[in-house]
Image (cartoon, grey):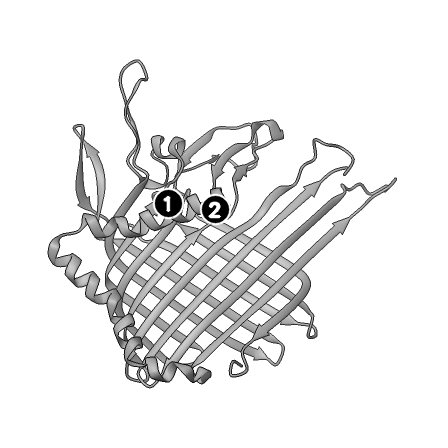
Amino acid sequence: MNILAASVARLFFYLIQPYFLITKTMKKFFSLLFLLPVCLLAQEAPALKDTSYWKSGSSFNLNISQAGYSNWASGGINSIAWTMLNNSFLDYKKDKVSWSNSLELAYGMTRLGKFSDPKNKFRKTDDKISFISKFSYGLKNTKFSALLDFRSQIANGFNYPFPTDSAKTFTSRFLAPAYIVLGTGIEYAPNANFYVFYSPVAVKGTIVDYQPFADAGQFGVRAAYFDSVANKLVEGKNSRFEFGSYLNAKYKKDLTSNITFTTALTLFEAYFREELKDGKYVNVFNGNVDVFWDATLLMKVNKYITASIATTMIYDDDVKLLRRKDEDKPAGERILGPAIQFREVISVGFAANIRSKNAK
């Protein structure tokens, strides 16, 4: 519990840190922006006893796969894998006011080889925290909106390069990295299946709450400064904040009565980026766009059994990845730099859904 409390406290510190870095005028603007939902909902307070304006729900999925071989002529390796998924939402809508909140959690592990061999340990295969909160006020299709977007992972992550586990590299942990976007803009939602939100005034925070990562300048934060004999003179920064434009779009469609397709796209372009020139950091024009794209095809076999195909594509110019120059040569030259990150998961498992009475 102490570790959890400390993590929550650090997250709160990073959330409020941008407020102290912006100008006095911008402080008034952002204060008004994010106090607006409270003020408008406060006006609705007498009616909140009527819960018909609220909708909530949560879905849980557990996917398990296992394979075992004994004297199998064609060859093979024993394996066991599991993945847990949770998608929850809490929405409020009355007249011109709407407030939507969604939380996505995913965690999965796999183990290859003989289960009796202690060297064959479970490896993480899926890890995701995604929380989006959006407050909107306006007409039926076009609304003024304020949005909070938070993304991170739950547990430590490792890269397992060829050929041995002993060479694994520590790559991530909770809040290292984490991404927070705060923005205000216009939302267009012509129907219940599609919406797009665009903010020309958004701030993106990158959190690296692990000092070795920060000292190395990973995920775009300022690296530590060392003297000629490798003594650390200045620690690396644990956070980085950028102002830019942000777009978030989502489309959901029931292809048949038991097949649903969902895709979500998030884009962020910082207006300027920091570069180190002549020993000083200066702001230069930024032409890079951060991309986060999800797509999921969900198929319901029955009330408790589901199958899904999920893909995720990420591109962030600030994330430098060590990879093989030629994927066909495991022992070949390695390069460090940005790259398109892609993941796909095909799974079949058990599902359970909990929803409020007025939620479809």
Depth order, front residue of 343/23: 23
Residue visible at 24% across and 71% down in the picture: 36
**CA neighbours of label 1 inside 10 A, class few (<14), some (14 to 19), many (20+):** some
Q: What's the residue type where badge 2 is placed?
A: Leu
Left or right: 55 as drawn, with respect to 260: left
Q: Are marks 1 and 2 in contact (CB under 8 Å)?
A: no
**CA neighbours of label 2 inside 10 A, class few (<14), some (14 to 19), many (20+):** few
Q: Position of residue 179 (x, y in %)?
A: 37, 51
Q: Position of residue 82 (x, y in %)?
A: 66, 52
Q: Secondary structure at mark 2?
A: helix
1 or 2: tag closer to the N-terminus: 2
Residue 51 in sight from this viewpoint: yes
Left or right: 83 as drawn, with respect to 240: right
The residue pinned by badge 2 equals 4
In the displayed structure, would residue 21 be above or below residue 252? above
The residue pinned by badge 1 equals 10
Q: Position of residue 248 (x, y in %)?
A: 36, 65
Q: Secondary structure at mark 1?
A: helix
Residue visible at 11% across and 58% down in the picture: 25
Residue 205 is labelled as: none
Task: Give the CA separation, mark 1 to mark 2.
Answer: 10 Å
Depth order, front residue of 209/344: 209
